[in-house]
Amino acid sequence: MLNDGTVEKPDWVSPPGHTIVSILEERELTVEQFAHIIGHSAAVAQKILDGSRAIDVDLARRLARAIGASENFWMAREHDYRASLTEPENVRVSSLDDLIGGLPLSDMQKFGWIETPRSRGDQIAECLNFFGVSSLAQWQGRYENAFQQAAYRRSTAYASCEVSTTAWLRQGEIETQNDKVSDWSPKALESQIPQFRRLTWYKSPELFLPKLKAALAEAGVKFAIVRAPKGCSASGAVRILADGTPHIQVSFRYLSDDQFWFSLFHEIAHLLLHYDKMPILENTELTEEQCEQEANEYAAQVIVPVSYREELLSLGGSRFPIIEFAKKVGVAPGLIVGQLQHEGIIGFNQMQRLKRRFRWTN
């Protein structure tokens, strides 16, 4: 099977079909045979070869499985070709200066994602290397539409910067690229939820995070905690990587246990409820709002099951009833406080001491 490194560097302003034709000729495959292995008709296959049929995410995955290289390679190849046909003003990030100007370079250096460059040229080279691309067109193909390839929770308290968030997403890929996980199993993931609820009682992330990561890996899910740089307002994201592996990423933005666990359960909900409709923001009958609402409801019910909901709403704002209810339900008191605040039963300044607070150590 081919990988990105073994594919001969193509003419990036020619249709991706030219690269495919070269591979077919090398393997002595006909158009009809190519059509069969990608699951399309010969007519569609011919349109792919001559460039009149654009390569979308689904087709990129089929190509990766059928003839090699990665989904990212085929998406970048497609974007490079289409970009060569597009007027520069129609491209949101139209120059390397736009890209560098939009990246949170100071935080990326502070967090150790990139080295401190000595010159503008070094700065550009360092950033392209960070994203694993060699040109602006490749970056556009792989990352400019990252928001359409991730279901993510955003805080309205922070300004959103798409370029900054692509850096955050990329760092999540880097941190998990060597992680070994089992085959994806939604049944296995759902079976781990009782364990996740028990982990909410652990005070130290050093104790619960390794157990959490291991449990997710058993269900076939990669997991990363990545500090959000300036301009990135994502609390969490869930994606399907090019090799088909689910990937959950959280930012630990608020450094409190209720926010962390709710974000995690929210992303798990997307995998269990919306896997077949990913990317969430593309090609789906569900709107983003519907998906987000369903994920929020699922997360809330993981924290407080439906059978306890009425009792939750009658708790009020007294410390000991909240603690006793948390013990009965089986999650840490901070998560109950978060639910009470969300329901408007207590103010956001009340019972804050029942929440566990965390801090970054680097």
Image: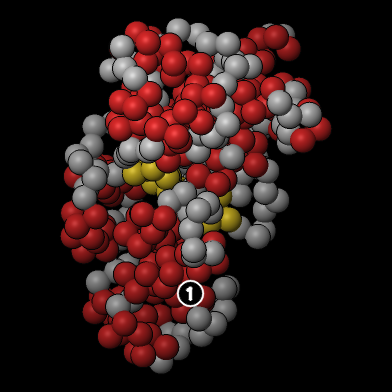
Q: Position of residue 206 (x, y in %)?
A: 31, 43
Q: Is residue 33 left or right of residue 352?
A: left
Answer few, some or many: residues within 10 Å of disc 1's Cα (few below 14, many 20 plus, some between 14 and 19).
some
Q: Residue at x 21, y 64 (%)?
A: 194
In the rendered view, does 327 fall on the left or right side of 140?
left
| Residue highlighted by disc 1 | 351
Expressed as whole percent of the image width and height from the top left, the position of residue 333 reads 36, 71
Specify whether residue 43 is in view: yes
Q: Is residue 271 above or below residue 182?
A: below
Identify the residue at horizontal 39%, vertical 46% (top origin): 248
Q: 291 left or right of 333?
A: right
Name the quadrant of the N terminus.
top left
Can you name the residue that lies furthest to the right here?
89
Q: Is residue 354 visible?
A: no
Quarter holding residue 192: bottom left
Q: Decide: is 340 above or below 127.
A: below
Which amino acid, mark 1?
Answer: Met
Of the pair 175 and 245, the residue shown nearer to us: 245
- The residue shown at (62%, 12%) is 125
Q: Quadrant of residue 300?
A: bottom left
